[in-house]
Amino acid sequence: MADEFKVADSQSELWTSYPIPVVQRFGYILESILGYAELSDAVYQKIRNTGIKLRKIYLDSKLKHIATDEFTYDSKWKMIVNTDLELD
C-alpha cells in the first residue's frame, strides 16, 4: 500500500474528494494500526498545509453514544478510539 500511494505527489483531490473525518481516520489507521508513520506524517502535513483544522471525532461513529471517558484519545489525529480494529 505504501508503495502505491504517494502523498507528496498527490494533488488536492484527496483533500477535496473525501470528507475530512475520512482523511483523519485514514491517517490514524496508517500510523496506529498499519505502522506507516512516515506516510501518516505526510498525510498530516498535507492537511496542516491546506489549513484544515481537525475536529475531535470517533474512530467508529456508530458507537459515539458511549461515554468518551471509556476510550483512549489520539491527540495528533483528534481521534477518540472507541473500537478495536482487526487486520485480516
Image (cartoon, grey):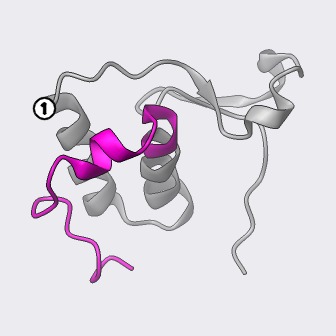
Q: Which residues are magenta?
A: 1-23
- 38 sits to left or right of 33: left
- Please tell me whether residue 54 is drawn above or below residue 82 in the rendered image: above
- Farthest residue toward the right? 66
Question: Residue 82: x percent and y percent?
Answer: 77, 36
Kindly indicate the quadrant of the structure image that contains residue 10: bottom left
Secondary structure mostly seen in magenta is loop
Question: Residue 58: x percent and y percent?
Answer: 67, 30
- Please tell me whether residue 80 is drawn above or below residue 22 in the rendered image: above
Q: Quadrant of the C terminus?
A: bottom right
Residue at the image point whose x is 44% and y is 55% from the top: 31
Judging by the rendered image, the residue that carries numbered circle 1 is: 49
For disc 1, the neighbor class at 10 Å (few under 14, some 14 to 19, many from 20) is few
User: The disc labelled 1 sits on which kind of residue?
Assistant: Asn
Does the stretch in magenta take in 51? no
Kindly indicate the quadrant of the structure image that contains residue 30: bottom left
Question: Residue 29: x percent and y percent?
Answer: 52, 55
Residue at the image point whose x is 16% and y is 30% from the top: 50
Foreground pick, 68 / 20 = 20
- 46 sits to left or right of 18: left
- Please tell me whether residue 66 is drawn above or below residue 10 in the rendered image: above
* Disc 1, SS: helix
Foreground pick, 76 / 26 = 26
- 31 sits to left or right of 83: left
Does the stretch in magenta take in 16? yes
**Number of numbered labels in the structure image:** 1
Q: Quadrant of the N terminus?
A: bottom left
